Amino acid sequence: MGAIPLVCGGGFVVLLLAIVAAVIALYNRLIVLRNRVDNSWSQIDVQLRRRYDLIPNLVETVKGYAKHEQETFEKVTQARNMAINAGTVAEQGAAENMLTGALKSLFALAEAYPELKANTNFMQLQEELTGTESKIAYARQFYNDSVMSYNTGIQSFPANLLAGMFGFTAREYFEIELAEAREAPQVSF
Amino acid sequence: MYEQISSNKIKSVLLVMFFAAFVVAVGAVFSYVFEWGYIGTVAAFVLVVVMSFTSYWYSDRIVLSMSGARPVDKATEPDVVNLVEGVAIAAGLPVPKTYIIDDPAPNAFATGRNPEHAAIAITTGLRDKLGRYELEGVIAHEMAHVKNYDTLVQTLAAVMAGTVVLLSDWMVRSFWWGGGRRRRGGGGGGQAGALLMVVGLLMLVLAPVFASVIQMAISRKREFLADANGAFLTRNPPMLASALRKIAADKNQLRRANKATESLYIYNPLKDIRSGRGLNALFNTHPPIDERIRRLEAM
């Protein structure tokens, strides 16, 4: 056997191994990106649940000082229940909007009761809720960032060839128009 | 961002190797000057190995205790911890531990060998003097450092530079006290010995300068990148710019900063001691604040 066919054969094997290695690396990368998308989606849920958990305590605290504002309490409780029981993403988005609005009224109401405003439990809950709303917004932002990385990953060459083969499909962005859950006032100081 | 992360990891390895070589070289010179034979070089090598491991595993604790930081949690500082948690979610990182430094000068730093073992420290001055979204912007800048593994490189560099400075300081002192006697009494090959003595002295004098220059080289580009990435996390560059303005305008001096840790802070805590002109500009750990603000506002 001559040296040349041996070298060519060897070279071909090396090339094949290199391609296999590249495919494995690409595949694993897509897996990482897709799992990040799934994880960030459930993270949104974690923050939403936290928010729902805080609300009964808040309502009780406010009731202690402002017994007669039944309407506002009911709005909040109703909106909360709707959000918890929401089915589709669209339903949840709408319920979230309502809940944010109801909470705004509740906090606006608190302005009229200075004793309530000064109550440490109330202040803690207010801070927690503000923090949670910010986290919900960030969780959605990170979800969208993850979706972008993943979609870009499966659409770029050469990964797009693999994506079709292995069933990686594009994910949807979280695009529902929400009332500003996190206000970012562009105020100049 | 991924290029930055792998670049930082490679740089960390190179940094450790470079410092190792440097310390061993200094140890070799030292042992020649004092005629210790190989013991000096071996001791230096062992020292470097110990230093490298300690730096890697404990650098964050060393830096935190050097700056007088105390840990806080949801119960003690709910506002700050909430902000840190929010930004961590935006960055997709585990929540770093939060620390507070009791000092009226507004400043902050991040440390840790990887995002799973990170810590962010802010001063009481920063907490009290900035608005909620400005503080969030600063925290996002620090979180960007954590995500990029800047904290690994910078903390390693801080601990190693500090050790080199300490070492050379000790050597100069023992040379001053002990070396003179041996020079007069013993061997050395006449002129060759004297020459090596000069080289040794030069190395001892240059060591802290060397350490500083290395710290500088890795710091400035990173600050711009952390500004940009931090602003991207919050989607709110004007707030970070506003925070930087307030920090720059503050007249207080951070009490527990020194040359080893200065590059870790968001704003140079030793700013007043060196001007930004000429040769001194080479030794600035941070890019000029005006340039940082300008870039943020252009986003």
Image: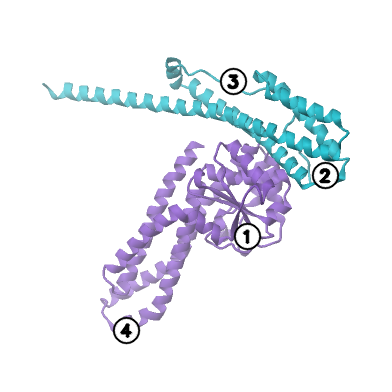
Chain colours: A cyan, B purple
Give the residue pinned by disc 3: A172
Quadrant of residue B66 in the image? bottom right
Amino acid of disc 2: Lys
The mark lying in front, picked from 2 and 3, is 2
Q: Are marks 4 and 2 on the same chain?
A: no
Q: Mark 4 lies on which chain?
A: B
Which quarter of the rendered picture does the C terminus of chain B lie within? top right
The mark lying in front, picked from 3 and 1, is 3
Q: Is residue A94 visible?
A: yes
Amino acid of disc 4: Arg
Q: Where is A10 relative to B48, above or below?
A: above
| Residue B87 drawn at (x, y percent) | 62, 40
Residue A117: assigned label: 2
Q: What element carries label 3?
A: loop
Using the image as rendered, state which of residue A11 and residue B278 is in the foreground: A11
Q: Earlier in the sequence, mark 2 or mark 3?
A: 2
Q: Is residue A182 visible?
A: no
Amino acid of disc 3: Glu
Residue B271: assigned label: 1
Q: Are marks 2 and 3 in contact (CB under 8 Å)?
A: no
| Residue A90 drawn at (x, y percent) | 68, 19
Number of numbered callouts drawn: 4
Quadrant of residue B133 in the image? top right
User: Label 2 neighbourhood size at 10 Å, few (<14), some (14-19), many (20+)?
Assistant: some
| Residue B156 drawn at (x, y percent) | 46, 54
| Apparent side of residue A114 relative to residue A57 in the rendered image (left or right) | right
Give the residue pinned by disc 4: B184
